[in-house]
Amino acid sequence: MHVKITYHLMPWEIDYALLTFTQLKKSVYYILPHIKITIDSVLNLSSNIIDWDKSKLPKEYFIEKYNTYSLLIDKDYTHNKKIYEGDELYGHLDLQRDCIGKEFTHYMNICPDLYFSERALTSIFQTIPVVKKHFSNYPHQIIVPEIYQMWDNTWKEIVAPEFKNIPHDQWHTADVFKIRCIKNQQVLQRQIKNEPPVGLNVVKENLKWTGWFDLYSKDLYEKIIIPPKDWKGYGPWDLFSMNVVADLYNDYKLKFIQIVINEKIAKYSTGPLSTKKGPHTGYWIQPSIKKFLCINENNTKKDQRQRMGKDGNPLNEIKHSKNSAVKKRIKQLKTNKKLWKSIFTEEN
C-alpha cells in the first residue's frame, strides 16, 4: 500500500501547517511499517493572487516558516516540498492533477485548517483490507471519517451520531477540542466493551463527502474524478467529483462504495478562536495575516469559484447545463473504450 497525500497552503494559512504537521508527526507512531506514505505539499506564493511589492510581509517570512514546520515530517515521510512563486493562477486543483503516479494505490487530500487525531490515518488505512475482503465487488471506493452536523440533511449519513441532534443552522459551532474529547471517550468505551477500535458503515442514500480528509481508490481518483484539465487553480472539485460518481452509479451501475468510519474530524477554523460571528467557513488565523498582504481581489479563490458556479447555481454549471463538466467527463470516459472498460461498470 502506497498512499499519496496532498496539502496545499496559501500564505495566510501558514500557521495551519504547524497544526497539521504536528498531527502527522504524532500519526507516524500508529501507522504500520508496511504502509508507505508520500506527501506532496505546496506553499502557494503566486503573484497572480498576491502583490508582493505592496505587501507588508515578504515571501521569505512564509518560506522560512514552511521549511521550519516541515522538519516535523521530513524524516518520517517522503515529503515533496514545493514553493510556487510564478505569476499564474495556481491552486489545489493543479496540485491534485500533478500528484498522480503509477506507484500509488490510494490518494488523500488534507485541508489546511482540519483537525484530525493521531489515530485517524491508521484507522482509515486499517479499513482498506476490511473493505477489500467484504466488498470485493466494489473496486471504486471512498473511505471517509465522521463529521459534525452540517447545514442540511444531505450530509446525514456521514454526520457522527453524537452530533445528529445539533440544529442544522448551528453547523458552524463545531469545537475541535470537544470533538477530540468525545472521540477519546469513544475509544475508551470500545476498549472496555472489547469492541473493534474502528467501526464502519456503508452509505446507502446520499453519496456525499467533504473532500477534507477522504481516501480515494486509485482508478477512481486517477481516471474518474481527477479535476478537468481546463480548471485552473481553484474550483468546486468536491461537487464535481460527487456528481460524476453519482451519475455513473445511478445510470451505469458503477461498482462504487462509500464507507464511513467512526473516526472524527473537524475544522479548526470554526472552533473557539473564531473572530467572526455567525456561519462561515473559517475566520481566525487567516485575517491576522491577510491584513498584511495585498491580495489581488480579481484573482482570488472566491472569484474563481464563482466563475465556475460554486457560489451561484453550481449544479446548473457543473451538472445540468448542456456542456456541463460532469457530462463532459462521462462522455470522455465512454469515448475511450479501454478506459470505459477499466472503470468496472455493470455495462462492461
Image: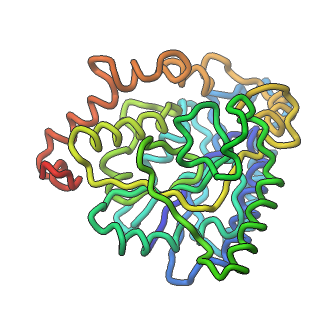
**How many numbered dots are placed on residues in this image?**
0
Name the image quarter holding the N terminus.
bottom left
Q: State the residue at coordinates (67%, 70%).
A: 119
Q: State the residue at coordinates (35%, 39%).
A: 246
Location of residue 269 by image quarter? top right
Q: Is residue 239 left or right of residue 174?
A: left
Residue 230 visible in the displayed image: yes
Task: State the residue in front, 50 or 339.
Answer: 339
Colour treatment of the image: rainbow
Image position, residue 192 (x, y; %): 73, 80
Is 309 above or below relative to 166?
above
Image position, residue 24 (x, y; %): 68, 65
Is 229 above or below relative to 107?
above
Q: State the residue at coordinates (20%, 34%).
A: 331
Image position, residue 122 (x, y; %): 59, 72
Is 330 above or below relative to 107?
above
Q: Is residue 38 left or right of residue 173?
A: left
Q: Is residue 5 left or right of residue 285?
A: left
Image position, residue 105 (x, y; %): 39, 66
Q: State the residue at coordinates (82%, 43%).
A: 271
Q: Is residue 144 left or right of residue 298?
A: left
Residue 42 visible in the displayed image: no
